Image (cartoon, grey):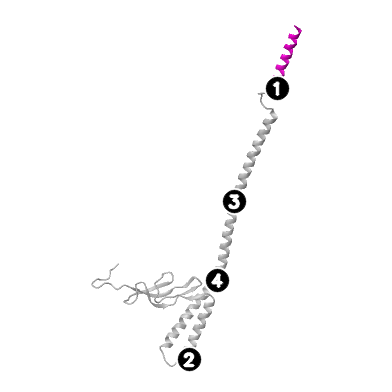
Amino acid sequence: MEENLENENSLSSGVESVSSSEPSSEAPPQGEEDGGDELDSVRRELDTKIDEVKTLNDKYLRLAAEFDNYKRRAQRDQSDGIRFANEKIFKDLLPIIDNLERAIQCGSDQTGNGGLLEGVELTYKQFLETLTKFGVRQISSVGELFDPAMHQAVAQVESETAKPNTIVEEFQKGYFLHERILRPAMVTVAKDKPAEGTSPSLD
């Protein structure tokens, strides 16, 4: 009888020990929940800061690119200002060259003034050489195709030898200042002869 009672007591204590060793299905302690919420908050804040850094970096790159463009424009404007600073002076000098050319042409048609003509030609040559040092050069005209950017047509003539839209005569020379037009050339341009039996159209 006593043995049975002892066996029952030992069995009951064994069951209790097994029950106490099983994992509990209860909720985790409050401290662990607070730790998880805090970690999520830190992650969200970190993501926000990363986005802010990306936005600021994009703004910096755009500003850097705009500054580089501004610097290049400023340097180009400064360079152009230096290269074309004397443009007005050169324009005022061109009529003097025109008069020298007229004097040479007039002297060539006359006799007995060889010394004077030679002096004028020398002056004209030196004048052109000096302007060339500063980037002034003449525009090619006669025999070239008409280009409205470089030539100013003052007349059109029918021609059997020149192709249409070709310059056949130059009234006034044109000049470049570096790559810029200082003065367009005044020219006469060839045009097609009307076909026989047809009258000119009146537009």
Position of the N terminus by quadrant: top right
Which residue is at 64% across, 40% downward?
45
Q: Amino acid at mark 3?
A: Lys
Q: Secondary structure at mark 3?
A: helix
Going from N to C along the chain, the mark reached first, 3 or 4, is 3
The percent coordinates of residue 160 (x first, y second) are 31, 76
Range of magenta residues: 1-21
Where is mark 4, residue-wise?
A: 83
Near-viewer residue (94 or 9): 9
Marker disc for residue 84? none
Marker disc for residue 115? 2
Q: Amino acid at mark 1?
A: Ser
Q: Secondary structure at mark 4?
A: helix
The percent coordinates of residue 138 (x first, y second) are 47, 76
Q: Residues within 10 Å of mark 3 (few under 14, many from 20)?
A: few
**Which residue is the extreme one toward the top?**
1
Spatial CA span between label 2 and label 3 = 73 Å
Where is mark 1, residue-wise?
A: 21
Q: Amino acid at mark 2?
A: Gly
Going from N to C along the chain, the mark reached first, 2 or 3, is 3
Going from N to C along the chain, the mark reached first, 4 or 2, is 4
| Front label number (4 vs 1) | 1
Going from N to C along the chain, the mark reached first, 2 or 1, is 1
Spatial CA span between label 4 and label 2 = 38 Å
